[in-house]
Amino acid sequence: DVKVTQSSRYLVKRTGEKVFLECVQDMDHENMFWYRQDPGLGLRLIYFSYDVKMKEKGDIPEGYSVSREKKERFSLILESASTNQTSMYLCASSFSLGSASGNTIYFGEGSWLTVV
Amino acid sequence: AQTVTQSQPEMSVQEAETVTLSCTYDTSENNYYLFWYKQPPSRQMILVIRQEAYKQQNATENRFSVNFQKAAKSFSLKISDSQLGDTAMYFCAFIRTQGGSEKLVFGKGTKLTVNP
């Protein structure tokens, strides 16, 4: 079974702290994505990556950065956490669209971040 | 900008009846993929059904089927014989290309409640 693992399910951080959210997939997927999910706003794309060391901004990248040093790992970084970044964060991965298996996206279980 | 629109924030249906969730999207591409995801209270995202735009035949998975109208850019989900376990948030999603990479974009979701 494909597995997308988010290392932290629940975190509580203080305003101004640097926060790392880690995501690992075990299927050699090219694409990886970070979303945040808020009530009434659905899932909004923060950043995505289509290859090692490659990254593209999504719809709400402000206040976030990402790192993809290895194919299986995609990290989301909050440089200085703020209370408006309290949310659930979802990681996802997939093969590229051009591949035979490229139209299935796999999600992690989510990371609940509270910034106080 | 939001390119996937789900116009029904909440819906309810009686057990064993049929319900249709609507979704429209915006793209100038000819080949793309569309998805419906289910998110139960556990928060894990579960793929319900997917549709390749180049396929004219509507996708079907057991009690779930879609009505894909490419010219109208419409992708509705029909759930037949609704069950209590179908209660969940349902998200319509769409893969589009951005600068050669693939971006997965979601609608805001429809909260479906199946009543006994």
Image (spheres, coloured by chain):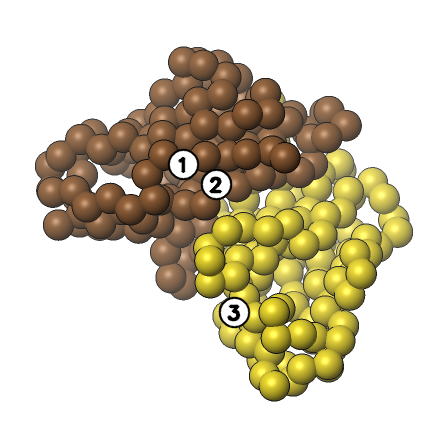
The subunit carrying tag 1 is A
Residue beneath the point at 74% across and 67% down: B78
Chain identifier, colour yellow: B
Q: Which mark is residue A108?
A: 2
- For the question of whether residue A97 can be seen, the reply is yes
Residue beneath the point at 71% across and 52% down: B49
Looking at the rendered structure, the kind of residue marked 3 is Lys
Q: Is residue B99 above or below residue A1?
A: above
Residue under label 3, please give it: B111
Cα–Cα span, label 3 and label 2: 21 Å
Q: Colour of chain A?
A: brown
Q: Quadrant of residue A75?
A: top left
Residue A6 is left or right of residue B50, and the answer is left
The subunit carrying tag 3 is B
Residue beneath the point at 13% across and 50% down: A116
Mark 1 secondary-structure assignment: strand
Q: Is residue A77 above or below residue B36?
A: above
Residue A66 is left or right of residue B79, and the answer is left
| Mark 2 neighbour class, 10 Å CA radius: few under 14, some 14 to 19, many 20 or more | many
Q: Is residue A77 above or below residue B8?
A: above
Quadrant placement of the C terminus of chain B: bottom right
